[in-house]
Amino acid sequence: YLSRPFTISFVPLRWAPLAASMAVLAFAILLNSGDTKPWNPNRQEIELSYITGRQLLAENKPAKAMPYLQKAASRLPDNADYHFWLGVAHWAINDFNNERASYNNTLKIDPGYLPAHVYMGHSYLDQKEWESALDHYKEVLDAVPDHPEALFNSGLALRKLGRTPVESNYCRS
């Protein structure tokens, strides 16, 4: 018995059904996890409006994008992204009051939504409201200290306020 050669044989095809079953089971578990939401035609319609509006904005057609983004923001009012992009569309058609209202809605939903702070800062900067612009840029710089737009525009607002010695230290404090 000890003089016979010792061999181990492995037949992969015997294990293939088990491996396939495990793969299908893992896939089914991932599909049914709590991260996925059930299909809802109303939600899909809202998402399609949002995507269409974003596409039209990317094609530099803000007037055409506006109704799609307004529909998305009004039908799902607790979505910060929808309000933010509606604000961008308002900016693109020079409707600055509604632009700020959209950014304010975004910040009411999510006070830490940094793009809204950046764009709100830009809006205040365009209207020469330097202190208000600084407040929004400071929010951004507290979260992302090397944000290029917030750094540059903070320096610009500080210079307009005559606070140039503070410019270099503004973001480090």
Image (tube, helix red, strand yellow):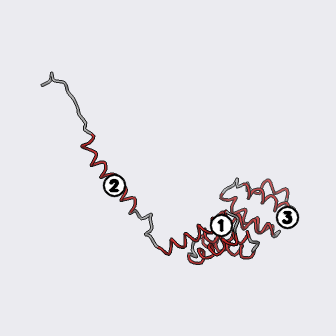
- Residue drawn 56% across and 77% down? 75
Dot 2 or dot 3, earlier in sequence = 2
Closest to the observer, 101 or 147: 101
Above-or-below relation of 3 to 91: above
How many residues crowd around disc 3 within 10 Å: few (fewer than 14), some, or many (20 or more)?
Answer: few
Q: Are marks 2 and 1 in contact (CB under 8 Å)?
A: no
Does dot 1 land on a helix, a strand or a loop? helix
Residue ID for mark 3: 161
- Residue drawn 78% across and 60% down? 154
Dot 2 or dot 1, earlier in sequence = 2
Dot 1 or dot 3, earlier in sequence = 1
- Residue drawn 74% across and 66% down? 121
Residue ID for mark 1: 56
Q: Are marks 2 and 3 in contact (CB under 8 Å)?
A: no
Give the image location of residue 87, x and y in percent.
68, 71
Q: Are marks 1 and 3 in contact (CB under 8 Å)?
A: no
Name the front one of labels 1 and 3: 1
Residue extending farthest to the bottom is 74
Image quadrant for the C terminus?
bottom right
Residue ID for mark 2: 24
Residue 83: image tag: none
Quadrant in the rendering for residue 127: bottom right
- Residue type highlighted by circle 3: Leu
Closest to the observer, 16 or 32: 16
How many residues crowd around disc 2 within 10 Å: few (fewer than 14), some, or many (20 or more)?
Answer: few
Name the front one of labels 2 and 3: 2
- Residue type highlighted by circle 2: Val
Mark pair 2, 3: CA separation: 64 Å
What is the tally of numbered marks visible in this picture?
3
Mark pair 1, 3: CA separation: 38 Å
Give the image location of residue 156, x and y in percent.
82, 59
